[in-house]
Image: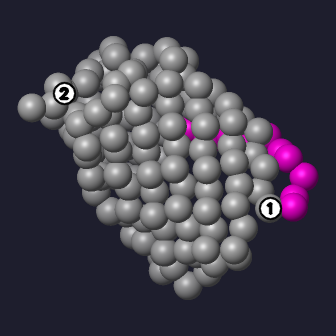
């Protein structure tokens, strides 16, 4: 049985490597950077990432994003900066997250904590103008 991870185990800085495969445009991209989890309340973490994004033939640029992770029972509720719901998942083993419809687009995520403290999040995104996979690897 996989061990359930707590907010404390995520807290701090992580190295981040992401590979983006865009099947719609037949291009690929990478992001190399850092992710940080900062405690912002009981069982609540602020996730922020910053990195250098290279995509296709475009010049490299700095990319940032942030989310709020709220640990509730045996799940993590992930929200956007504005508080809107994004998805939730169980921080244990191989974890399928809840799906996230966004207009005509559909986001599916799968987490892999089986090699902790190295872990992965892989998104499949499909929509009228989107068809890509974004695979992120985190480690300390």
Predominant SS along the magenta part: strand
Please say whether residue 58 is one of the residues in the magenta stretch. yes
Quarter of image, res 16: top right
> At x 61% / y 50%, what residue is drawn?
19
Residue to which mark 1 is pinned? 56
Is residue 49 shown above or below 19?
above
- Residue 51 is left or right of residue 35, and the answer is right
Q: Quadrant of the N terminus?
A: top left
Please say whether residue 115 is one of the residues in the magenta stretch. no
Residue 22: image x %, image y %?
63, 68
- Residue at the extreme bottom of the image, as rendered: 128
> At x 17% / y 25%, what residue is drawn?
3
Q: What is the span of residues highlighted in magenta in the rendered image?
A: 57-66
Residue 8: image x %, image y %?
33, 14
Distance in Å between CA atoms under marks 2 and 1: 38 Å
Residue 4: image x %, image y %?
19, 27
Residue nearest the viewer, comparing 140 with 68: 140
Element at label 1: loop
Residue 52: image x %, image y %?
76, 39
Residue nearest the viewer, comparing 28 with 35: 28
State which mark lies toward you, 2 or 1: 1
- Residue 102 is left or right of residue 128, and the answer is left
- Residue at the extreme right of the image, as rendered: 59
Residue 70 appearing in the image:
no
Number of other residues with Cα within 10 Å of mark 2, as a class: few under 14, some 14 to 19, many 20 or more: few
Residue 23 appearing in the image:
yes
Residue to which mark 2 is pinned? 4
């Amino acid at each position: 049985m996989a061990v359930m991870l707590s907010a404390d185990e995520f807290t701090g800085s992580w190295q981040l490597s992401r590979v983006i495969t865009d099947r719609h445009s037949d291009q690929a991209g990478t992001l190399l950077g850092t992710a940080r989890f900062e405690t912002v309340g009981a069982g609540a973490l602020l996730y922020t990432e910053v990195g250098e994004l290279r995509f296709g033939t475009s010049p490299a640029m700095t990319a940032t994003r942030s989310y709020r992770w709220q640990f509730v029972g045996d799940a993590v509720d992930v929200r956007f900066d504005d508080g809107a719901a994004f998805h939730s998942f169980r921080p244990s083993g191989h974890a399928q997250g809840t799906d996230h419809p966004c207009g005509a687009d559909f986001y599916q995520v799968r987490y892999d904590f089986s090699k902790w403290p190295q872990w992965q999040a892989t998104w499949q995104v499909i929509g009228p103008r989107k068809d890509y996979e974004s695979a992120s690897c985190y480690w300390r």
